[in-house]
Image (cartoon, rainbow, N blue to C red):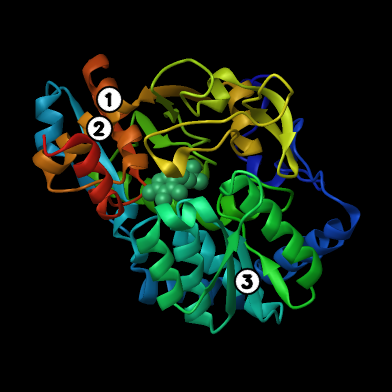
């Protein structure tokens, strides 16, 4: 099967199927006690979140609290520096409240929790970005919020830990194993198993068992819907290419979903980190193979025992050994091209966008900016729309310590 066999007019009706599969990817590979809880979320998602009442409340919140729609900015000076034949644009998800796209799905998940009559939201966090976005949503809706975080990450991410606590969330230290994200996921799942009558689990990307890859994509699709309309309005045409960085893949699915049925080249960018050796990057779609982790089937990086491999990226938000099942599906279909950018080009793009445009991007988003810059030099004409998933304020200390002011 390739993408000519797929009717993208009806794509969102057909994918995922009722069991949560995008082709062979996705599904739900979890213990039976957890499956009952997932079924409850799936049923609630279909019955509640498709209702006019839910949709209009979410739209009002997006406008009045989140600051949507976020604008598209034309990058005149960066386009000129890349030769001037190709026009670069960014979709400004960095201008969302809390500084990134993550609030798009956290507000949706927390609103669903409220409609379901739950008292608490539960999640894990690695670098703390998802924890902060979910703590923000919980404060807004008056829900309790338990965030599971590895002891090592708690030490590394002190400002985000403080933010979550100020927002009223409980940060629960996980001291098993390597004391990082994987152990935090396990601890959060266990807690959810025990508490699912009163709580809902809120995942941080288009990953995990069904219905999360679908639900998070649908909540993020506002990015693509806005971007398509705004770009047409600004230029009278569609962009020739759309680019986004891929960790779990939520910001990418958000913007891609607006353009899947258009004659637009779509690029998902994974972190090449320090190089091609296993352990030096987190480019799962490029170097990985089919496998199951965290309750879903996708393409992942494995060690010699078939377990999730250690990964590395300069951007902690891209540091994940798999990506969402829908990306694996679009990868195999060839509808989206997945490519990589290394740390060096990423940091260069970080400084270029800051200096030439007055926008300090998140290091995650800088991967997409770097690829957009490469495309601008390679294409002989046209336009490229880059999803700027977040702002770089969170990365200041790290950049100054590791790279200095360039
Ligand atoms: C978390 C994060 C990402 C990576 O998550 P996706 O699910 O792949 O979008 C990218 N950019 C920013 C700014 C983030 O905070």
**34 sits left or right of 98 in the view:** right
Q: Percent position (x, y) of residue 120?
A: 65, 77
- Residue under label 1: 344
Residue drawn at 69 percent across, 19 percent down:
304
Is residue 335 in view from this perspective? no
Q: Position of residue 205 (x, y in %)?
A: 56, 49
Disc 3 from disc 1: Cα separation: 38 Å
In what element is the residue under mark 3? strand
How many numbered circles does the render carry? 3
Tell me which residue sits at (29%, 34%) in the image: 369
Estimate the spatial distance between the alpha carbons at disc 2 and disc 3, rounded to whole Å. Answer: 35 Å
Please tell me how crowded label 1 is: few (under 14), some (14-19), or many (20+) other residues with Cα within 10 Å: some
* Horizontal relation, residue 161 to residue 211: left or right: left
The residue under label 3 is: 121
* Residue depicted at x 65% and y 49%: 183
Determine the secondary structure under disc 1.
helix
Q: Secondary structure at mark 2?
A: helix
Above or below residue 288? Residue 27 is below
* Residue assigned mark 2: 347
Q: Nearer the viewer, residue 381 or 176?
A: 176
């Amino acid at each position: 099967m390739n993408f000519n066999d797929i009717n993208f007019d009806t794509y969102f009706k057909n994918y995922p199927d009722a069991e949560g599969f995008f082709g062979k990817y996705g599904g739900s590979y979890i213990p039976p006690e957890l499956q009952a809880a997932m079924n409850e979320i799936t049923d609630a998602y279909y019955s509640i979140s498709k209702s006019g009442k839910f949709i209009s409340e979410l739209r009002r919140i997006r406008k009045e609290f989140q600051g949507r729609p976020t604008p598209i900015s034309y990058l005149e000076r960066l386009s000129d520096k890349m030769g001037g034949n190709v026009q670069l644009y960014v979709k400004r998800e960095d201008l969302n409240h809390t500084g990134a796209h993550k609030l798009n799905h956290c507000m949706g998940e927390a609103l669903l929790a409220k409609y379901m009559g739950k008292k608490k939201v539960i999640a894990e966090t690695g670098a703390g970005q998802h924890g902060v976005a979910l703590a923000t949503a919980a404060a807004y809706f008056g829900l309790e919020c338990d965030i599971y975080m590895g002891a090592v990450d708690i030490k590394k991410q002190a400002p985000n830990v403080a933010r979550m606590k100020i927002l009223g969330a409980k940060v629960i230290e996980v001291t098993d194993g390597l004391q990082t994200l994987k152990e935090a996921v396990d601890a959060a799942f266990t807690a959810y198993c025990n508490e699912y009558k009163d709580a809902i689990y809120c995942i941080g990307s288009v990953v995990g068992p069904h219905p999360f890859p679908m639900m998070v994509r649908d909540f993020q699709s506002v990015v693509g819907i806005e971007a398509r309309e705004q770009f047409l309005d600004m230029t009278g045409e569609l962009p020739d290419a759309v680019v986004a960085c891929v960790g779990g893949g939520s910001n990418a699915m958000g913007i891609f979903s607006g353009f899947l049925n258009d004659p637009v080249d779509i690029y998902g960018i994974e972190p090449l980190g320090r190089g091609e050796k296993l352990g030096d990057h987190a480019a799962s779609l490029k170097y990985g193979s089919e496998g199951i982790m965290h309750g879903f089937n996708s393409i992942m990086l494995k060690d010699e025992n078939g377990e999730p491999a250690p990964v590395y990226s300069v951007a902690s938000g891209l540091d994940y050994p798999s990506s969402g099942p829908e990306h694996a599906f679009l990868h195999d279909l060839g509808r989206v091209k997945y490519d990589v950018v290394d740390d060096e080009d990423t940091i260069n793009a970080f400084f270029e966008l800051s200096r030439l445009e007055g926008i300090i991007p998140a290091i995650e988003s800088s991967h997409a900016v770097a690829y957009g810059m490469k495309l601008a030099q390679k294409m002989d004409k046209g336009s490229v729309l880059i999803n700027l998933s977040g702002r770089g304020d969170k990365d200041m200390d790290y950049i100054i310590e590791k790279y200095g002011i360039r």
